[in-house]
Image (spheres, rainbow, N blue to C red):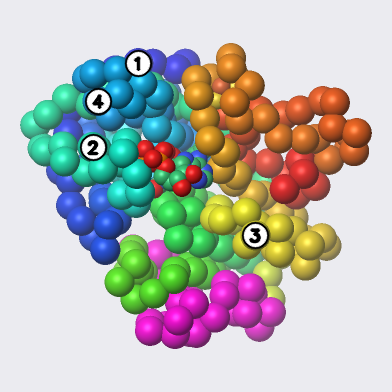
Amino acid sequence: MIRKELCKIVSQDEIAQDIFELVVEAELVNEISEPGQFVHIRVSNSWDPSLRRPISISSYDKKSKKLTMIYRKEGKGTSLLAKMKPGMDLDILGPLGNGFPVDKVDAGETVLLVGGGIGVPPLHELSNQLKAKGVNVIHILGFQTESAVFYENEFMKNGETFVTTVDGTYGRKGFVTDVMKELTFDSIYTCGPTPMLRAIQQNYQDKKLFLSLEERMGCGVGACFACVCKKADDPQGVSYKKVCSDGPVFRAGEVVI
Ligand SMILES: Cc1cc2nc3c(=O)[nH]c(=O)nc-3n(C[C@H](O)[C@H](O)[C@H](O)COP(=O)(O)OP(=O)(O)OC[C@H]3O[C@@H](n4cnc5c(N)ncnc54)[C@H](O)[C@@H]3O)c2cc1C
Ligand code: FES
């Protein structure tokens, strides 16, 4: 069930340049069904900006009711969010969307989790759940540069972790796809910029592959059609899927990216 809730901010820390980890205490944690779902946040008490901002659930703990999000300070909305302090109330709608299906892989399988930039956060809870299930998880985390790198140690706790930076200032120089070529695995779960998702989908058509997409959003609940993308089996493009309520996670080949 989707809930709208005023949550208490527990902590907010800058964990890399312009990257914030925000922890809230929220009853809606009990409604989360899959890693990769997201929440829609009201970042201001005024009507500017009027639209909520979608942010992935990075991890959660149903016992303590803690929900962790990681976001990049980008524009007006996330800049306002970055100013909020522990103890303040935050208006959150969620959990929203369909996340990564953990039941599609079995214990003993080797699964690659590939994140690009701010696509890394939702893979953390996924990694935790796959590891707990006995899946062998390998992570590839791609960033622009050293100052943008975060959560390497958190992922290392669950399995082998490769970090790439485009400028070579940290980890391997280059793209996540360079490291993918060197590895053997059964399935892929990925989230990140569209060109990265497109390249992975093109190169790994023989693998079980799930991709989390990003679109600009209005309502977040399937009512406004702001976030539609074309269905892959309808090349004329007259029928659509909504990223907010049909996704954000899709099977490879389900929608046009
Ligand atoms: C399902 C979903 C999950 C997301 N999860 C996260 C997350 O975990 N962490 C995180 O940092 N961000 C995440 N985002 C992106 C985040 O919602 C946007 O960065 C945020 O809304 C920007 O708001 P703003 O007011 O700061 O920036 P704006 O002033 O609205 O825009 C700043 C810049 O970001 C671009 N932008 C804004 N929204 C998007 C978007 N949805 N996709 C691509 N470009 C966009 C704008 O074109 C502009 O260039 C997610 C988006 C979706 C749809
Ligand atoms: S954001 Fe309104 S339908 Fe998806």
Determine crowd level at label 2: few under 14, some 14-19, many 20+ residues with C-alpha closer than 10 A.
some
Residue 116, visible in the rendered structure: yes
Q: Is residue 69 left or right of residue 220?
A: left
- View quadrant of ligand 2: top right
Are discs 4 and 2 less than 8 Å apart at CB?
yes
Name which of mark 3 and mark 2 comes first in the sequence: 2
Question: Mark 4 sits on what residue?
Answer: 44
Residue 217: percent from left, percent from top: 52, 30
Q: Is residue 254 left or right of residue 134?
A: right
User: Mark 3 is on which residue type?
Assistant: Pro
State the SS at label 3. helix
Question: Mark 1 sits on what residue?
Answer: 4
Question: Mark 2 sits on what residue?
Answer: 80
Q: CA distance from mark 4 to mark 3?
A: 32 Å
Are discs 4 and 3 less than 8 Å apart at CB?
no
Question: Mark 3 sits on what residue?
Answer: 195
Q: Is residue 11 left or right of residue 60?
A: left
User: Mark 1 is on which residue type?
Assistant: Lys
